[in-house]
Image (cartoon, rainbow, N blue to C red):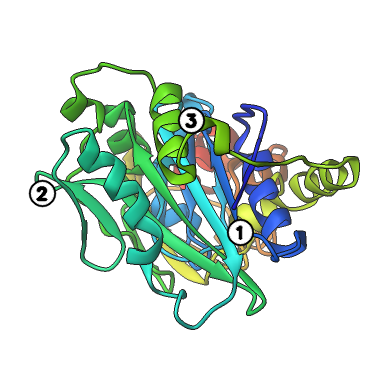
């Protein structure tokens, strides 16, 4: 097994690009291990509806990254207190869906630290009945990875806030996350180490000792491939939002001029249908407003840009384009 050094990069778009690039391009004559730590971000499962999984108001006000990964499963929150590990191997029918195979080395380390950890259910590691790790897998039938989170010293309040969706009504075909009681590993270790020392303990346990660790050195070709993948995929709206399954959403709010009840259908991240109902006293034909945003991205800025020159007072009441766009996309 070779250890891939990500140079302590904390940009999630780079780290997820690195993981995908490696699993698709490295010679799987060897197995590989990658660790990475991301700055605050919500990492969305491949088959999920992004809007359904995030607290968009909190995400926006706290500059939290939202990135879709290539593995399935639910949405997770990453921050600088969360350690991510990824085991990369050849595809094997005995390995796919076998989370025990890949979590056993981590569980062994945790037990060595005096933590009563175990694989619980299909793909979670728990301690004292609380989740400290969630795991998922990806395969292209030639190679695969099994990766997981390790909540070491995350801000658990931020975990709740970032993933606490409060949209009025969403009906989606996406795979919904199941929220579990979570805990930090540092609670069980008594804060005797930092996350990098914790990573070193896991690494040395897996390789046998520090002097037995062998590294895979990323080439310039590798680094260029990772940069391109990050820019062309993981930093794009089309991947992170546009790949969401089709969903219907209802937004309902009482303003000073009356109630607005908005119904939207979103497909491939774009508004495919839009209707406005309510008890407001506007005078214009609502179809004029509705048609303006059909086909655009379900995104606050896109909606604002499209309606910025429309006199919404004429159609609805005393509301600006910015307020209306925030109403349609916010919590």
**Residue occupying image coordinates x 39% and y 69%:** 175
Residue 40's label in the rendered image is 3
**Separation of marks 3 and 2 at Cα, in angstroms:** 25 Å
Residue depicted at 30% across the width and 41% down the height: 109
Label 2 Cα neighbours within 10 Å, binned few <14 / some 14-19 / many ≥20:
some
Query: Foreground residue, 26 or 259?
Result: 26
Q: Is residue 81 left or right of residue 310?
A: left
The quadrant in which residue 7 appears is top right
Could you give the CA–CA distance between mark 3 and mark 1, rounded to whole angstroms? Answer: 29 Å
Q: Quick one: label 2 or label 1, which is nearer the N terminus?
A: 1
191 lies above or below 76: above
Task: Tell how many labels.
Answer: 3
Secondary element at image label 2: loop
Camera-side mark, 3 or 1: 1
Q: Which residue is mark 1?
A: 31
Q: Residue at x 47, y 38 (%)?
A: 203
Residue 83 x %, y %: 43, 36
User: Residue beneath label 2, please?
Assistant: 129
**Viewer-side label of 3, 2:** 2
In whole angstroms, how far apart are the C-alphas of marks 2 and 1? 32 Å
What is the secondary structure assignment of the residue under circle 1? loop
Query: Which of 149/111 is in front?
Result: 111
Tell me which numbered mark, 3 or 2, is placed earlier along the sequence: 3
């Amino acid at each position: 097994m070779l250890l891939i050094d990500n140079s302590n990069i904390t940009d999630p778009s780079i780290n997820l690009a690195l993981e995908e690039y490696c699993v698709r391009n490295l010679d799987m004559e060897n197995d590989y291990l990658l660790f990475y730590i991301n700055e605050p971000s919500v990492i969305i499962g491949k088959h999920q509806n992004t809007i359904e999984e995030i607290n968009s108001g909190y995400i926006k006000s706290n500059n939290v990254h939202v990135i879709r990964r290539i593995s399935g499963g639910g949405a997770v929150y990453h921050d600088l207190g969360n350690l991510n590990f990824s085991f990369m191997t050849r595809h094997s029918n005995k390995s796919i869906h076998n989370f025990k195979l890949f979590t056993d080395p981590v569980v062994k380390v945790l037990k060595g630290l005096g933590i009563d950890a175990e694989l619980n259910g299909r793909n979670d590691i728990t301690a004292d009945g609380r989740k400290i790790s969630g795991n998922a897998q990806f395969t292209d039938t030639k190679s695969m990875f099994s990766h997981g989170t390790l909540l070491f010293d995350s801000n658990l309040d931020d975990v709740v806030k970032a993933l606490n969706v409060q949209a009025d009504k969403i009906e989606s075909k996406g795979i919904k996350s199941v929220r579990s009681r979570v805990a930090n590993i540092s609670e069980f270790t008594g804060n005797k180490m930092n996350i990098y020392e914790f990573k070193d303990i896991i690494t040395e346990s897996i390789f046998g000792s520090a002097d037995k660790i062998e590294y895979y050195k990323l080439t310039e070709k590798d680094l260029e491939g990772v940069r391109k993948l990050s820019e062309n995929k993981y930093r794009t709206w089309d991947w992170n939002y546009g790949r969401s399954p089709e969903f219907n959403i209802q937004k309902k709010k009482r303003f000073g001029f009356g109630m607005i009840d908005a119904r939207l259908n979103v497909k491939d991240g774009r508004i495919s249908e839009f209707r406005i109902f309510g008890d407001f006293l506007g005078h214009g034909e609502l179809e004029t407003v509705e048609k303006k945003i059909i086909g655009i991205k379900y995104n606050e800025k896109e909606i604002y840009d499209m309606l910025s020159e429309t006199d919404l007072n004429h159609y609805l009441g005393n509301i600006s384009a910015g307020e209306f766009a925030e109403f349609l996309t916010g919590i």
